[in-house]
Each structure stands twice: as C-alpha cells, then as structure tokens.
Amino acid sequence: MPIVKLTHFEATVLLAVAISIVLGVTGRKTDRERLLYGLKCFGYFLVAIFGLGWLMYLGHG
C-alpha cells in the first residue's frame, strides 16, 4: 500500500471537504439545497482555516 504524505494544509482542506459533504447531504431536503449548503459550509471552513492560520502566524511573532 502506498504511503500518502499530506501537508498540514492539505489534510485540513481534505477534512473540510469531507465534513462539508456530510453536512450538505444530511442538512437539507432537496438536491439543490444540499449542494449550496455544502459549498457554503466549505467556504466557511476555508475562511476559518486561513483566518486561524494568520492569527497563529501573527501571534507567534
């Protein structure tokens, strides 16, 4: 079995994709609402990832 090496950023984005898919599928009733909700959640995750990343960068000095 090949070894997959992901950076911290890649692993975080992969987790955000997985969680967004689950939230999109379970969160709404119609297919269109599911897709839009999943994309919205993924966008929120990306904003949180970059925001917290910059906060840690600036706080580290």
Image (spheres, rainbow, N blue to C red):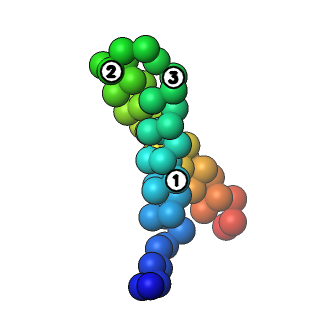
Where is residue 15? Give x, y as percent. Answer: 52, 53
Residue identified by numbered label 3:
27
Residue 31 horizontal side relative to residue 48, left or right? left
Q: Residues within 10 Å of mark 2 (few under 14, many from 20)?
A: few
Residue 18's place in the image compared with 34, above or below, is: below
Which structural element holds mark 2? helix
Mark positioned earlier in the residue sequence (1 or 3): 1
Q: Residue furthest front?
A: 1
Label 1 and label 3: CA atoms lie apart by 17 Å
Label 1, secondary structure: give it.
Answer: helix
Name which residue lies at 34% across and 27% down. Answer: 35
Mark 1: give few (<14), some (14-19) or many (20+) Cα within 10 Å.
some
Q: Are marks 1 and 3 in contact (CB under 8 Å)?
A: no
The amino acid on which the numbered mark 2 sits, given as a three-letter code, is Asp
Query: Looking at the rendering, in which quadrant would you find the N terminus?
Result: bottom left
Q: Secondary structure at mark 3?
A: helix
User: In this figure, which residue is indicated by the disc labeled 2?
Assistant: 31
* Distance (Cα) linking label 1 and label 2: 22 Å
Of the two numbered discs 1 and 2 on the same chain, state the one appearing first in sequence: 1
Q: Residue 58 placed where, x, y %?
A: 62, 59
Of marks 1 and 2, the one in the foreground: 2
Q: For mark 3, does the 10 Å Cα neighbourhood hold few (<14), some (14 to 19), or many (20 or more) residues?
A: some
Q: On the rendered image, what quadrant is the C terminus found in?
A: bottom right
Amino acid carrying label 3: it is Gly
Task: Residue at the far top: name it.
Answer: 29
Look at the image and tell me whether residue 32 can be seen.
yes
The residue that appears at 65% across and 58% down in the rendered structure is 56
- Label 1 is placed on what type of residue? Leu
Of circles 1 and 3, which is in front?
3
Q: Which mark is on residue 15?
A: 1
Vertical arrangement, residue 25 with respect to residue 51, above or below: above
